[in-house]
Structure formats: structure tokens, C-alpha cells
Amino acid sequence: MEEPFFEIKEEEKSKNYTKFVIAPLAQGYGITLGNSLRRVLLTNLPGASITSVRISGVKHQFSTLKGMKEDVVEFLLNLKKVRFSSEKDKPTKGEIQKSGSGEIKAGDIKTEPTVKVANPDLTLCVLTKDAKLDAKLEIETGVGYSPAEDRATGEVGIIPLDASFSPVTRVNFKVEETRVGRLTNYDKLILDISTDGTIEPKRALLTAAKILVSYYTQIVTPKKVEKQVEEVKDLGQIGKLSVEEIGLPTRVANALLKAGFETVENLVIAKRQDLVKVRNLGEKSVKIIEAALGEKGLNLSTG
């Protein structure tokens, strides 16, 4: 089979949007590439979002804040729209501290130097003369969509938010016929990509293609998956305990369950670096897990 040879052109380009034309493709490859690229672009590219907020004087999302025109629910909905670019994979902090009348915009969020607000002109709320807003934000990186329930802690005052991490806001594609010499049975893939401003459409396309290449490479030249050869000592009844029974926060336990770590034995066998990579966990959460296992006289694997 001949090596594929086609061009990628940027036919239209504006702020956060590009129309790509990929041609000529062998018949059928327009849909094949279009489907796979669209799925990866929408669900597998990393981004950053606010995952929880603590507002001084507010106990839950159905409260009101004196002097703020919007109710707390509307304010939280606006916070979900704030888009960040982050140079770190670890969670970071943000805060809003404002008093007196006027609009509060996304640009008023104070963050670490490694985190930038991509849409600073977004209005979050409007304060009256005697109002004061003091909000502490948790900003995390991730992929896809993460519901607030995954981070529910039960702690009064901390309000978890649904988080849409994907930096790509819209992807559409269509396939048309194109000509190569006298032959007309070739595909032309037209791909429309819109982003939230934290990543350029071309970079998003290249990143998605690299992700697909990594999966196909594993099929063509598979890397050997190292099986756990270390024999784990008999943990008895302790090993059979679920992660929900060893005093872990609900958010941490839920993240472990979703990743397939259901029991203490699963945790002991797991490698520490693998737990750090679990969605909605991180270094801080792994330290909490280590402390919980330590109370049982157990440790995580460092292999």
C-alpha cells in the first residue's frame, strides 16, 4: 500500500477559529480521520478550570451575598465560564477580593504566575456600594468533563463546581469528493475547530493527531506491559476493606473507585506514580491515601 500523501491548508482563520482542509485522501479516509480527530479534540485535550470555591459569608450555593446583584448560583455559573491556561499539572489557587460598587470581571481573579485567564473581560457579578466579595478558588487541570459530585467533600463552605476542562469548544467536519488527475473518488476533509482561547486551533489539531499516533504505535510496535511480579503478602481482612472504609475523603474514594482501585489490596499493589495520575487526584490526595494506609501499618508501592 502506498504511503499517504496529502496537504493540510488553513482556508479560514479568525480569533480562536480555523477551517482546515485536508486533501486528497483515499476514499473513506475522510470519515475515518474526521471522526477520530473530532472525538479526541473534544474529549482528550487537557485544560484548566475552577473546581471549587469558598465565598466568605456563604455556606452553600443557594445562599445570597449582601450587596451582590446576582444570586450565588448565577455567580457560580459565571465562574464555570472562566477559561485558564496553566503551565502546571497540579492544582493551584486563585482568589477574588473586591469591595465597593462595580463589575467584577474574570480579569480580577488573582492567580499564580503560571496560570493565565484567557477571557478577562467576562463579567462575573456586579457589586453595590457597600458590598464585599472574598472568594477562594481551586483551579485544576484535567481532560473532558468532571461533575461536581466527584469532588463533594461535605465540608461546609466549600462549593464544588462542574468542570469542563476541554479547551476545544466546537468541532465540525464534512467530507466532499475531490479530483486527482482524472480520478474523482478521493476525499476532501473539511474540519472546523473553535477553541476557548487557551490553545490555537492548529496546535489543538496537532496534539489530537499525536494522541492518535501514540495509540496506533502501540498496535504496530507494542511496548511490553510489565505485569506485577511482586508477591503481595497476605493482608487478611485489611486487604479486603474497600477504599470507602479506611477514612478517605469522599472525593478521593470516588476517584479511586472510578479508576478501579476498590480495595486496600488494590492500593498496596498500585504504584505511587500511577495513583498521582488518576483523574481528580494528585500529589496532595496521594499523601492523604498514604496517611490512611499508614494507620493500617501499610505503604504504597514505590516500584
Image (spheres, helix red, strand yellow):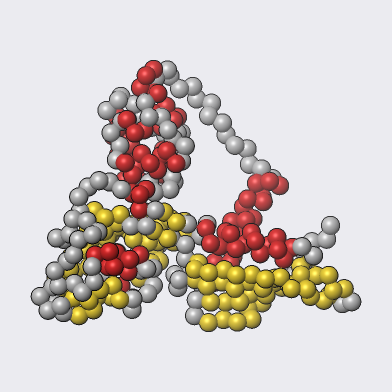
The image shows a total of numbered marks equal to 0
State which quadrant residue 128 falls in. bottom left
Residue 80, horizontal then vertical, whole percent? 35, 65
Visible in this render: residue 268?
A: no
Q: Residue at x 33, y 36 (%)?
A: 289
Quadrant of the image for the N terminus?
A: bottom right
Q: Residue at x 20, y 61 (%)?
A: 63
Visible in this render: residue 149?
A: yes
In this view, the residue farthest toward the right is 182
Q: Is residue 183 left or right of residue 79?
A: right
Q: Residue at x 31, y 30 (%)?
A: 246
State which quadrant residue 86 falls in. bottom left
Q: Is residue 280 left or right of residue 228?
A: left
State which quadrant residue 97 falls in. bottom left
Q: Residue at x 44, y 30 (%)?
A: 266
1 versus 233 height, above or below: below
Residue 84, horizontal then vertical, whole percent? 38, 67
Q: Is residue 286 left or right of residue 41?
A: left
